[in-house]
Image (tube, coloured by chain):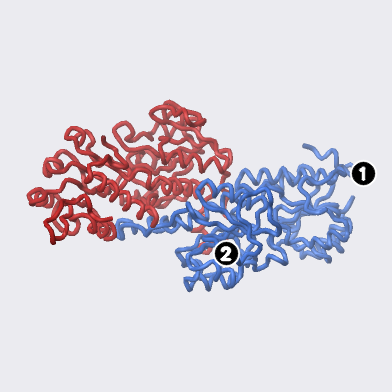
Chain colours: A blue, B red
Amino acid sequence: MASSAAATASGEPPAILFFRRPGAPFNAALRQRFRVLDFLASGEPLPVFLAAAAAAAPDPPRAAVVMGGGAARVDAAFLDALPSLRCLVSTAAGVDHIDLAECARRGVVVANSGTVYSADVADHAVGLLIDVLRCVSAAERFVRRGLWPLQGDFPLGSKLAGRRVGIIGLGNIGSLIAKRLEAFGCIIHYNSRRQKGSVSYKYFPNVHDLASESDVLVVACALNKETQHIVNKDVLEALGKEGIIINISRGANIDEGELVRALNEGRIAGAGLDVFENEPAVPAELLSMNNVVLTPHSAVFTLESRSDLCDQMIGNLEAFLSGKPLLTPVLP
Amino acid sequence: MASSAAASPASGEPPILPALLLLRTSDASLAAALRQRFRVLDSFASGQPIPAFLAAAAAATDPPRAAVVVAGGVVRVDAAFLDAVPSLRCVVNTGTGVDHVDLHECARRGVAVANSGTVYSVDVADHAVGMLIDLLRRVSAAERFVRRGLWPVQGDYPLGSKLGGKRVGIIGLGSIGSLIAKRLQAFGCVIYYNSRRPKDSVSYKYFPNVLDLASESDVLIVACALNKETRHIINKDVLESLGKDGIIINIGRGANIDEPELIKALKEGRIAGAGLDVFENEPKVPAELQSMNNVVLTPHIAVFTWESKSDMCDNTIANLQAFFSGKPLLTPVLP
């Protein structure tokens, strides 16, 4: 699809700021439609890059594609440096790298990845849980080290059915996780900002109570001021020594230091983690544990959802540039 | 439960528990649970070779009428076995598969055979789904990547593939196959199957043979019993038909798949990956598989959870008690 609806007065494709790792097919798709000003490819420090963008000819960028994870924080300083910016498109569902209050104040609209990733993240969360309970990766290591003929049977795993799974955050992802785990015979409990009338799962007004009545806690909520370290020492204590944590949200949703201590001391039984407080650094203690499953923020990454994401991002950009509402708005 | 079905003792004497053969396990908890109710002749504890053990049991004053057989390669309940202990009228298997039991010989002699029924089905289904997610989303491979400290060095791990929309062909829609189907539907997979006969109670698309099933599936899951018809049911043709993006999951028996052909197909990229919990010569896992990143290998653990081990124990005892009370077996294979 050509960017005919979004051409500038000069007839050239509009400029788009791009904050994401270079090399993805996504970049190529964007370049077919827009003039891409690529931060990581520029090699410049952020203020220099933004100043150059503000002075870009024939027109400065009105939109930016921003990936979470440290490439750039879109805050007041960023927005001040580039007054032409009226639209931010996040390539993630999460927008914790964007100062929404500042954007709202300036009338900058923000889109995220909508539900493009939701099924994949939910699938990965379930995969992590099965892996922790049934020791799939640990058993794999056992086989690959040639231990099966030497040591005989592998230790027993634990059944899924009948386990009480407490989901923190029953949004798109949390709901899909619930639906999948119900098929395994799990009992679904949840905590959300507000109780949801449309579901029959048991609601808990706070995470501590949820933890005390759950065998598994799944963190499926956004990261913001309220949910930073929402899983803390107290919650881990309430979850108890047979308990398991699964995190597919943001590392900072969990007090990682406390989690590592709890695992070390056997105060919880295991964890499946796709995200960490300081990616790509994973606490060394976790690397030697057999009751944890660690994946490198890959819950979102499938070939299919990457392709869907590409379509979604371009759809949002073209909607904005044509003066239409965003497809997957976070703001307004 | 007390051994009410045991022979009535003379007053003042302890009850005489029925004799029971147990072959062949080092699992102390099963032996202990059985000992509460039966006079257990424990093959493993005896230290004797099986023929000597059977001969001694048969020569005893109260020879055993029932046997608990633990599958796992060592014990074959065949004509020789049954000849050695003519008192045997019932064989209770702790597993689901009875490929180590000569059902024909048992039927001929009127020996009843029970298996674990559906005690393990849920756990096996869960494990099969776990392996499929692991393969498609590269969970274990990504795990290795993280544990080797490669994430900070090499950046993102290669993309996996979505579950939703994948066509999953299940070979054998018994209790395990059905549970797998139900789970995968919740992920948005499309379910196809092959069985000896189509099942009216399900709406999944039926394929009369495995070759056709393979050609229209992205994933093949082996969930059938092992017998003469299903030995090497996954052969070179089926692998060819599945194609280079295809994935195989095996939670049946190693011999359901032509293992050397599978390895060749994986090496040559003629299929995309495999999740295997069973192998033709357990506990030997072919070395070529152990170095591949697109396979998931587990040591026959699909059945092994604490909960189902306990359920298996209960099921075994319940079948034995039924037999000794003259009642029908709870989970019969024969008759």
Residue A92: image x %, image y %? Answer: 70, 54
Give the residue drawn at x 52%, y 64%: B149
Task: Tell me if residue B48 can be seen.
Answer: yes
Q: Nearer the viewer, residue B167 or A10?
A: B167
Of the residues tagged 2 and 1, which is closer to the observer? 2
Estimate the spatial distance between the alpha carbons at disc 2 and disc 1, rounded to whole Å.
Answer: 58 Å
Q: Amino acid at mark 2?
A: Ala
Give the residue drawn at x 78%, y 64%: A46
Q: Chain of mark 2?
A: A
* Quarter of the image that includes the N terminus of chain A: top right
- The number of numbered discs placed on residues in the rendered structure image is 2
Residue A211: assigned label: 2
| Sooner in the amino-acid sequence: mark 2 or mark 1 | 1
Give the residue drawn at x 43%, y 27%: B198
Crowding near pointer 2: few (<14 within 10 Å), some, many (20+)? Answer: many
As drawn, A306 above or below A43:
above
Label 2 with label 1: CB-CB less than 8 Å: no
* Left or right: residue A79 compared with residue B94: right
Q: Secondary structure at mark 1?
A: loop
Q: Amino acid at mark 1?
A: Ala
Q: Secondary structure at mark 2?
A: helix
As drawn, A267 above or below A322:
below
Q: Nearer the viewer, residue B130 or A92?
A: B130
Q: Chain of mark 1?
A: A
Crowding near pointer 1: few (<14 within 10 Å), some, many (20+)? Answer: few
Give the residue drawn at x 29%, y 48%: B318
List the single residue furthest toward the top.
Answer: B208
* Left or right: residue B202 compared with residue A300: left
Residue B11: image x %, image y %? Answer: 13, 58
Residue A9: assigned label: 1
Residue A317: image x %, image y %? Answer: 80, 46
Residue B37: image x %, image y %? Answer: 23, 55
